Amino acid sequence: MIPALEPLFKGPLAPLGAWLALDDDPRPALSMAEYLNGDQLGDLLQRFAPQYANADQRGLVSLWGKYHFMRLVAPTVAASLLMNWRLPVRFDEIAVIVGDDGLPSAFQLPHQGSVWQSPPSDGFARFDTLFAGHLDVLIRELAARYKVAPKVFWSSVGHYYEWILGEIDTLGLAPEPVAQARQLLSERQRPDGTRNPLYDMVRYVPRAGQSTLHRQRKHCCIRYLLPDKALCDNCPHLDKPPAGYDPAGRSD
């Protein structure tokens, strides 16, 4: 827990605080370069799910990556929107405290960050350090190494990003900051003209037999490539499963 953020991480947001730490935390930590080292990352995946050692590693790294995305995105976004707090989460300035399960237990930051001195101009500026400064770099590395389309990872990022925005909405925050944050889901391009990888990553669509709109990811996370994993409840393939997919014997 970062002391300056203790007032934020209470009640339903309490678990998020445990995913952030400072550099005085006594637990061993890996730099991001060490964390993604080929042998090291292979060991993390093995510890995370040893039963999939001989399975399709694309599905495994996608499943593993979800925990990194959730545990970094959720507290960073909550701190920004609820306390106007800017956290130092750039790829080359943080370290990762890894649990025995091969997953990030916490992200070790070089300092506790600070309040924005002047309001960011838009959602892209607000979250530039998180998305352009960290996740862009991480996803390029994972996608190249495991031959997975970057959109697979960005779909998981978008899933958790849209989820935490919804949670924050329920806390009665003034609508302007959340509307600014939702720009990252609604605009095709970043301000510099490059493609926005989060655009339209979560959709609400009609589905047969449902009276309310169904929350659906734009792209599949490909966890179904693992032998006993079923399609997610929000998978875009639910009504038309991939060729060769057999749900028998699969579970969440």
Image (cartoon, grey):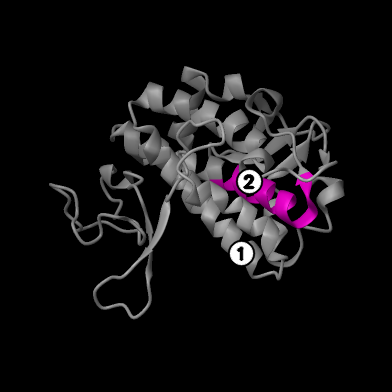
Q: Residue at x 35, y 57 (%)?
A: 232
Three-letter residue code for mark 1: Glu
Q: Which residue is mark 1?
A: 167
Relative to the observer, which residue lies in front, 18 or 120? 120
Relative to the observer, which residue lies in front, 15 or 82? 82
Q: Is residue 141 above or below residue 135?
A: above
Q: Residue at x 60, y 45 (%)?
A: 73
Mark 2 lies on a secondary structure that is: helix
Q: Quick check: is 39 in the magenta stretch?
A: no
Residue 242 in percent (x, y) is at 18, 49
Q: Residue 49, can we see it?
A: no
Q: Is residue 22 above or below residue 205?
A: above
Mark 1 lies on a secondary structure that is: helix
Dots 2 and 1: beta carbons under 8 Å?
Answer: no
Q: Is residue 215 above or below residue 87?
A: below
Toward the left, the furthest residue is 244
Residue 205 in percent (x, y) is at 34, 66
Q: Residue 9, can we see it?
A: yes
Three-letter residue code for mark 2: Gly
Looking at the rendered image, the quarter that the C terminus falls into is bottom left
Relative to the observer, which residue lies in front, 122 or 20? 122
The Cα atoms of the two marked residues, 2 and 1, are separated by: 17 Å
First to last magenta residue range: 70-85
Q: Residue at x 42, y 45 (%)?
A: 155
Q: Which residue is mark 2?
A: 123
Toward the bottom, the furthest residue is 211
Q: Residue at x 38, y 77 (%)?
A: 212
The tally of labels here is 2
| 229 lies left or right of 178 | left
